[in-house]
Image: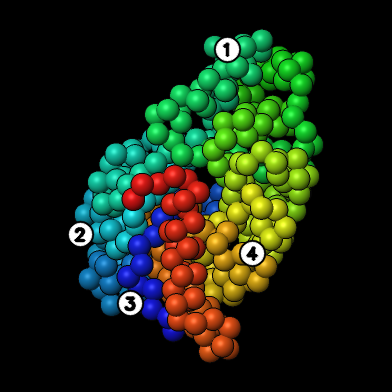
Amino acid sequence: MVDLSEIMLVDGHSHQVTAAPVSDDEFAWWCTEASYAIESSLDSQLGSAIRRWCAPVLRLPAHADIQDYLAARREIGAAAATRDLLRAARLATMLIDTGTPSAGLAGLKQMAELAAADTHEVVRLEALAESVVDEAGAANFADAVRESLDRAYADGAVAAKSIAAYRHGLDLAPERPTQSEVRIAAEEWLRARSAGSARLTDPVLLRHLLWCAVDARRPIQLHTGFGDADATLIRADPAWLQPFCAATQDHGVPLVLLHCYPFHRNAGWLAHVYPHVYVDVGLSVGYLGTRATALLAEFLELAPFGKVMYSSDAYGLAELYLVGAAQFRHSLGRVLQDFLDDGAVTVKDALAIATAIGSGTASALYGLQR
């Protein structure tokens, strides 16, 4: 197997974690995309991966019993365990989506200190819109979104992210909405907010956010595929984005398709045929455990090697950062060894592919200095 244990990674999409103590039930809840915590969330590929990759960091043998692992975590202390697990992931940089609930979680500066890595913000478009609409009003909403996004980039953000897959589905009309359409939709949304429905779900406004991000000329990350039950999975298929990919092709703005599983072959095709489309293997690598080897091999069937990027999509627990990174290195090493055994690549080729996926492409795409 090609040894990738020493390569540093750019985690291209992730979230904040807690450094505070968590109960066993809370730990299990962080380890599932389900809306409920059940014991079986750890009787899974992810649970096995935690026991495999994280237990040695807490000075236990690999595959230690999960109850022994949780006991060791408590004994070491949550803050120390979080620090050690994050640093074991060997990350150069983390790009952190700040649009998720973060009460009780580490801020970006603390995340950087815990992981000994650089951190940069990814702006969640829907959260940004929800933060400005009440004060801006319908008439000024369009401009307020653009101004707020510009401020975020001026403050160091490196990308925007859309969760239209959750709020409506990716089957959106591709064209830019008119100013009149945006104002009317914003009026309707404000009426809904006054009645207690605060979330942005209107397809016109979701399209407006995407086009604001296009105009800002920074990479746009789009959630696709696997996630929690708040999304209708079939409408999160990245194939729905083909019209938007075509409409934005000449704008020079990278579109990064996050997660993608189980539609990762569709995403790979989009990266193959559109010059500005990239795929990110986040979230699924950790959840699939040893089967991530098959996932990565399938990502690399059609997607150009230099358009595939690593991320963990870790949220809540430092373990999810380490599992994502360790499983990615291990599984990609197995895939590349298969390439070598078949005579498809040289050793130099294999290392170049690993470096591009692990950090090189993301560093160039997001303008990272390190």
Q: Amino acid at mark 1?
A: Ala
Q: Position of residue 48 (x, y in %)?
A: 44, 72
SS of the residue under disc 1: helix
Task: Give coordinates of residue 114: x percent, y percent.
Answer: 26, 49
The reply to whether residue 317 is in sight is yes
Would residue 197 appear left or right of 324 to someone viewing this image?
Answer: right
Rendered view: 355 above or below 151: below
Label 3 CA crowd tier, 10 Å (few <14, some 14–19, many 20+): some
Q: Residue at x 42, y 28 (%)?
A: 154
- Choose the circle earlier in sequence order: 1 or 3: 3
Sequence-first tag of 2 and 4: 2
Q: Which residue is mark 1?
A: 136
As drawn, the label of residue 23 is none
Binning the other alpha carbons within 10 Å of mark 2 as few (below 14), some (14 to 19) or many (20 upward) gives: few
N-terminal of the pair, mark 3 or mark 4, is 3
Inter-mark Cα distance, 1 to 2:
48 Å
Which residue was labeled with disc 2? Answer: 76
Residue corresponding to mark 3: 62
Q: Tell me how far mark 3 sits from mark 2, CA to CA.
A: 17 Å
Callouts 1 and 4 close, C-beta under 8 Å: no
Disc number lying in front (1 or 2): 1
Q: Is residue 301 left or right of residue 340?
A: right
Amino acid found under the numbered disc labelled 2: Ile
In the displayed structure, would residue 342 be above or below residue 226? below
Q: Are marks 3 and 2 in contact (CB under 8 Å)?
A: no
Query: What amino acid does circle 4 point to?
Result: Ala
Q: Which residue is mark 4?
A: 303
| Above or below, comparing residue 196 to residue 303 in the picture | above
Residue 82 pos. (x, y %): 28, 54
Q: Name the residue type under label 3.
A: Ala
